[in-house]
Amino acid sequence: MKTLAVGDFKTHFSEVLNDVKHGEEFVVCYGRKKEKVAVLVPYEKYVKQPVTLGVLEGIASYKINDDFAMSDEDFLNS
């Protein structure tokens, strides 16, 4: 994964997109402290892959409703 300052990202935008199309990932940093603000990944990697149930595959099933909402903090504190 490569890291780019926002200025470099803007300057090399087309090249970065071409690299992303070929599987490369980028972190975009901003400000004097180089705060990480975004990650640019290929769309295929972004699209969520189905979860396999391991040893229960074919025996058990699951369904997640479209309106399901739980933050990472809620999940970790449960």
Image (spheres, rainbow, N blue to C red):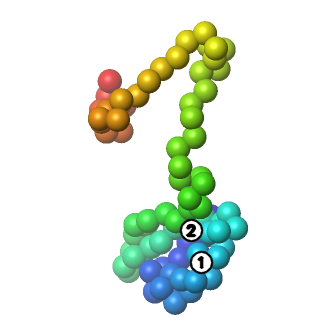
Which residue is at a point 66% across and 73% down the rendered structure image?
19
- For mark 2, give the secondary structure: strand
Which residue is at a point 59% across and 77% down the rendered structure image?
16
The answer to whether marks 1 and 2 mark residues whose Cβ atoms lie closer than 8 Å is: yes
The quadrant of the rendering that contains the C terminus is top left
Disc 1: which residue: 16
Which residue is at a point 59% across and 53% down the rendered structure image?
45
Query: Callout 2 environment at 10 Å: few (<14), some (14 to 19), or many (20+)?
Result: some
Disc 2: which residue: 26
In this orientation, does residue 50 appear? yes
Q: Is residue 17 above or below residue 43?
A: below
Residue 51 coordinates in the image, percent (x, y)? 56, 31
* Amino acid type of the residue tagged 2 in the rendering: Phe
Residue 53 coordinates in the image, percent (x, y)? 59, 21
Query: Callout 1 environment at 10 Å: few (<14), some (14 to 19), or many (20+)?
Result: some
- For mark 1, give the secondary structure: helix
Mark 1 or 2, closer to the camera:
1
Residue 28 coordinates in the image, percent (x, y)? 47, 72
Which residue is at a point 54% across and 83% down the rendered structure image?
13
**Disc 1 from disc 2: Cα separation:** 8 Å
- Viewer-side residue, 77 vs 39: 39
Residue farthest bottom in this picture: 11
The quadrant of the rendering that contains the N terminus is bottom right
In this orientation, does residue 70 appear? no
* Amino acid type of the residue tagged 1 in the rendering: Val
